[in-house]
Image (cartoon, rainbow, N blue to C red):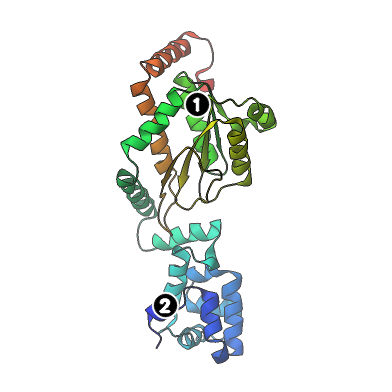
Amino acid sequence: MTTQDQMPKLLGDLIARNSTKLTEADTRLLDVLIRDPIRAAMENGKDVSSRAGVHPASAVRLARRLGFKGYPEFRGFLQSNLMEGGGDFENPAARMAARLVRAEEGSLLASVLDSEIAALQQVRNAVSDAEIRVFSEALRDCRRVLIFGRGHSAALSSLISLRLNRSGYEAIDLGNQMHQLPELLATLRQDDIVWLLAFRRVSPLVQEIRKVAAEKQAKVLALTDLRSARIDPAPQHKISVSRGGAGESQSLVVPMTIANAIILDLAAIDDGRSLRSLGAFKAFRGESGLSPVLL
């Protein structure tokens, strides 16, 4: 039997290696697996055979022809491929299914918590206080902060903007001002900051905003995960950190924690500006007749 170390990493490669051994029943099974590899990684051999319209033992025979001891071992191969982010499963649904696979034998909540805790623990060694200080000093000394993120990072962009404004800094969440994006970028100055957020991949719009910032000579900060593609031109300052391994929850808590640390450090170095602004905001909220829901 082929050892696991010699096994191809992807299902497509495994099929190609054993194509001369495959029967008509095998082909029908593989068609079912390839059309829905996420479901295939979750089902047993009997269920897969039923969907393919072949004998219940056909899935076991296929697994053995592909070099596995039985279908459970083949299913383990599919699950590993799912969790390691192989090309067969590179889509959002696959990533969610991978997390379900990891939690299959235990509590789903416990699995998510373990993933988040592990991701947060590695931040301690991955990001230094000096890197946090570089960001906070840039924010302290700027005229205005323009923050931009797409997808999941849009939620963090909104939170950063809210916290900076309450701390007395003019901050604009560009994602909430898309209808005025050209006008806002046209007014960029050398003493402005553009803070970019990019997780998993860098959207074309992030690249375009970076290009405009370079033309306007505005300083650019970037908070990204390790899988994010390169931003070009490179930001003046960048923090990149893992949000979790393959098959694990891709934590939003990690970048949010880093952003919170930056804003907290900003309050420590801006001669009371943040604290005074927060105090004034609290007083205004208490004295105004505006609905607390709106504040």
Position of residue 21 relative to residue 37, above or below, is below
- The amino acid marked with disc number 1 is Leu
Position of residue 239 relative to residue 77, above or below, is above
> For the N terminus, which image quadrant?
bottom left
Distance from the alpha carbon under mark 2 to that under mark 1: 50 Å
- The amino acid marked with disc number 2 is Pro
Location of residue 220 in the rendering, given as x and y in whole percent from the top left corner: 51, 35
- The secondary structure type at the circle numbered 2 is helix
Residue visible at 58% across and 39% down? 210
Label drawn at residue 295: none
Q: Residue furthest top?
A: 287
Residue visible at 35% across and 59% down? 106
Residue visible at 37% across and 48% down? 116
Label drawn at residue 162: 1
Give the class, few, some or many, for how many residues have Cα within 10 Å of label 1's Cα (few <14, many ≥20). some
Position of residue 124 relative to residue 165, above or below, is below
Give the class, few, some or many, for how many residues have Cα within 10 Å of label 2's Cα (few <14, many ≥20). some
Residue visible at 52% across and 75% down? 11
- The secondary structure type at the circle numbered 1 is helix
Location of residue 175 in the rendering, given as x and y in whole percent from the top left corner: 60, 34
Say whether residue 54 is left or right of residue 252: right
Give the residue number, with chain letter if any, for mark 2. Answer: 72
Location of residue 108 in the rendering, given as x and y in whole percent from the top left corner: 39, 55
Determine if residue 68 is in view. yes
Depth-wise, is mark 2 or mark 1 nearer the camera?
Answer: 1
Say whether residue 213 is left or right of residue 71: right
